[in-house]
Image (spheres, grey):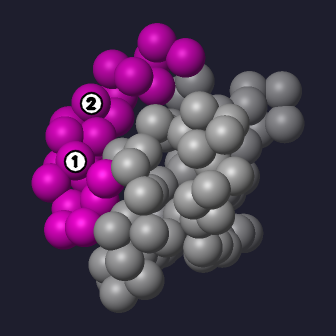
């Protein structure tokens, strides 16, 4: 499994307005090949948004990152930060990670 972390500058919307504005996008992302789950992130005070994604494999994580980066850049977003990590199963199980290894 691979964890993808993405964040970028955002002037909003945040909170419930974000949930309403991006509902269709969330439904589209839910269909991504290899996606296990996504947690949407936001920080109104620091004007940032993004997400934490768990993918079944690196190939799908990289493919989605490329697609998502192009989508964000198409919206005029600059300063996208992204990282892909391995998941440490034994330690994650101890700390109640909601995934099977």
Label 2 Cα neighbours within 10 Å, binned few <14 / some 14-19 / many ≥20: few
Residue 69 showing in the rendered view: yes
Separation (CA) of disc 2 from disc 1: 11 Å
Residue in the image at 69% along x and 52% along y: 91
Marks 2 and 1: CB-CB under 8 Å? Answer: no
Q: In which quadrant of the rendered image does the N terminus lie?
A: bottom left
Residue 73 in percent (x, y) is at: 49, 72
On residue 57, the disc is none
Magenta highlight on residue 6: no
Q: Name the residue under label 1.
A: 30
* Nearer to the camera, 1 or 32: 1
Q: Name the residue under label 2.
A: 23
Magenta highlight on residue 20: yes
Q: Is the magenta stretch mostly helix, strand or loop?
A: helix
Residue 90 in percent (x, y) is at: 62, 56
* Nearer to the camera, 68 or 37: 37
Choose top left, top right, bottom left or bottom right for residue 94.
Answer: top right
Choose top left, top right, bottom left or bottom right for residue 96.
Answer: top right
Give whichever of discs 2 and 1 has the lower sequence position. Answer: 2
For residue 84, side relative to residue 48 (left or right): left
Residue in the image at 42% along x and 58% along y: 101
Residue 64 in percent (x, y) is at: 35, 73
* Nearer to the camera, 57 or 4: 57
């Amino acid at each position: 499994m691979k964890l993808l972390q993405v964040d970028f500058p955002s002037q909003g919307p945040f909170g419930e307005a974000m949930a309403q504005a991006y509902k269709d996008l969330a439904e589209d992302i839910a269909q991504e090949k290899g996606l296990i789950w996504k947690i949407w992130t936001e920080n109104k005070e620091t004007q940032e948004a993004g997400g934490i994604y768990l993918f079944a494999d690196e190939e799908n994580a990289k493919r989605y990152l490329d697609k998502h980066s192009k989508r964000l850049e198409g919206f005029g977003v600059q300063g996208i930060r992204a990282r892909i990590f391995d998941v440490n199963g034994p330690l994650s199980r101890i700390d109640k990670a909601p995934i099977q290894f």
